[in-house]
Image (cartoon, rainbow, N blue to C red):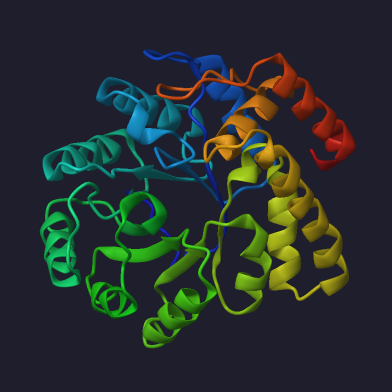
């Protein structure tokens, strides 16, 4: 019998990087090490094919393979969420069906990108896709990349759909958080999680359900401990752990001068830690030796082995 997601779903979900050897080959051994590393660190779920997983840059063949391999390796030890975002409706449905067949627990969907939808059109789109998939559906609010946000009133309407169970917001807009929380006040079982890790603790303290934090690829225990401290209102521990989170985002994510610096830094750090290859899918390329040396020094400055 298929297990059900808790309602609301709480905790730390790691948006897994996609370990690659080249543009057409997954680093399977690296994927195994990464998954074991995050599960040992206590994460509550694994989210593949999100922004951190470079979903838009990898082929459908690799997306299907990643779903298969991740579900096989995880083997129901934690919940698996699969990103199904695509500009083509049919491709999102196909990915959702693949996720269901492989034993994933939920799927995650951004607004379709390229064409700009009005909110009524977005609601119609979600009604159509929700009717065609059999797994619980999370919304993924990422206006920086998609040019569209799920307006609070749209989220309120969507929360009434039986197949939609939550939203992950990566807007870093505190006013938006508050408006969505207000819109969801009659839906306490609807999961609300945040992407930007710098504000995850404050978000949980104000009633949010957890974080989908990229840094949990490197240091899952750090983010799980910060989440637990926030739930327990342990402010001394929060202050100590939060300083580490800010140090990570102010150093490892800031090497280089482009928007890709976060992902390049994250993958480079995982490579330096011996977890997985840092090959980047086109159009990006991994850091060269000067940047790699900076990342190694930043890891040493973090005393990173103490965070494992």
> Residue 268 sits in which quadrant?
top right
- In the image, taking residue 244 as reference, residue 92 lies left or right, namely left
* Residue 54 appears in view: yes
Q: Residue at x 24, y 63 (%)?
A: 163
Residue 308 percent location from the top left of the image: 79, 38
Front residue of this view, candidates 154 and 76: 154
Q: In percent of the image, x 64 and y 65: which residue is there?
A: 199
Q: Residue 228 sits in which quadrant? A: bottom right
Q: Is 222 left or right of 67, judged from the image as shown?
A: right
Q: Is residue 142 visible?
A: no
From this view, report whether residue 214 is shown above or below residue 234.
Answer: above
Using residue 229 as the reference point, say whether residue 267 is left or right of it.
left
Position of residue 99 relative to residue 171, above or below, is above
Residue 49 in the image, given as x and y percentages of width and height? 39, 37
Count of residue discs: 0
Q: Nearer the viewer, residue 218 or 289?
A: 289
Q: Residue at x 47, y 24 (%)?
A: 284
Name the spot of residue 5 as percent of width and height, x first.
41, 58
- Outermost residue to the front: 257
Q: Dividing the picture into quarters, in which one does residue 215 lie?
A: top right
Say above or below: 27 vs 60.
above
Vertical position of residue 105 compared to residue 17: above or below: below
- On screen, residue 170 versus residue 68, left or right, reads right
Q: Position of residue 211 (x, y in %)?
A: 57, 58
Question: Which residue is at the front of the view, 205 or 4?
Answer: 205
């Amino acid at each position: 019998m298929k297990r059900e997601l808790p309602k609301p779903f709480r905790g730390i979900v790691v948006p897994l990087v996609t370990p690659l050897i080249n543009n057409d080959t997954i680093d399977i051994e690296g994927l195994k090490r990464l998954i074991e590393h995050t599960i040992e660190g206590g994460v509550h779920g694994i989210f593949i094919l999100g922004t951190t997983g470079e979903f838009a840059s990898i082929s459908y063949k690799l997306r299907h393979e990643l779903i298969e391999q991740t579900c096989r390796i995880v083997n129901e030890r934690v919940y698996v969420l699969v990103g199904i975002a695509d500009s083509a409706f049919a491709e999102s449905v196909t990915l959702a069906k693949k996720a269901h067949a492989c034993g994933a627990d939920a799927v995650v969907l951004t607004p379709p990108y390229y064409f700009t939808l009005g909110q009524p059109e977005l609601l119609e789109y979600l009604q159509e896709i929700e009717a065609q998939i059999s797994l619980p559906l999370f919304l993924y609010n990422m206006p920086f990349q998609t040019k569209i946000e799920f307006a609070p009133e749209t989220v309120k309407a969507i929360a009434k759909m039986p197949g939609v169970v939550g939203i992950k917001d990566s807007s870093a807009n505190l006013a938006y958080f508050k408006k969505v929380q207000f819109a969801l006040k009659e839906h306490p079982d609807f999961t609300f999680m945040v992407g930007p890790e710098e504000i995850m603790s404050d978000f949980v303290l104000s009633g949010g359900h957890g974080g989908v934090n990229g840094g949990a690829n490197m240091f899952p225990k750090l983010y799980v401990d910060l989440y637990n401290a926030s739930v327990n209102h342990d402010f001394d521990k929060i202050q100590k752990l939060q300083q580490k989170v800010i140090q990570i985002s102010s150093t490892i994510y800031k090497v280089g001068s482009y928007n890709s610096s976060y992902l390049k830094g994250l993958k480079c750090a995982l490579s330096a830690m011996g977890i997985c290859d840092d090959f980047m899918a086109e159009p990006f390329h991994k850091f060269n030796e000067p940047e790699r040396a900076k990342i190694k020094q930043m890891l040493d400055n973090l005393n990173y082995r103490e965070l494992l």
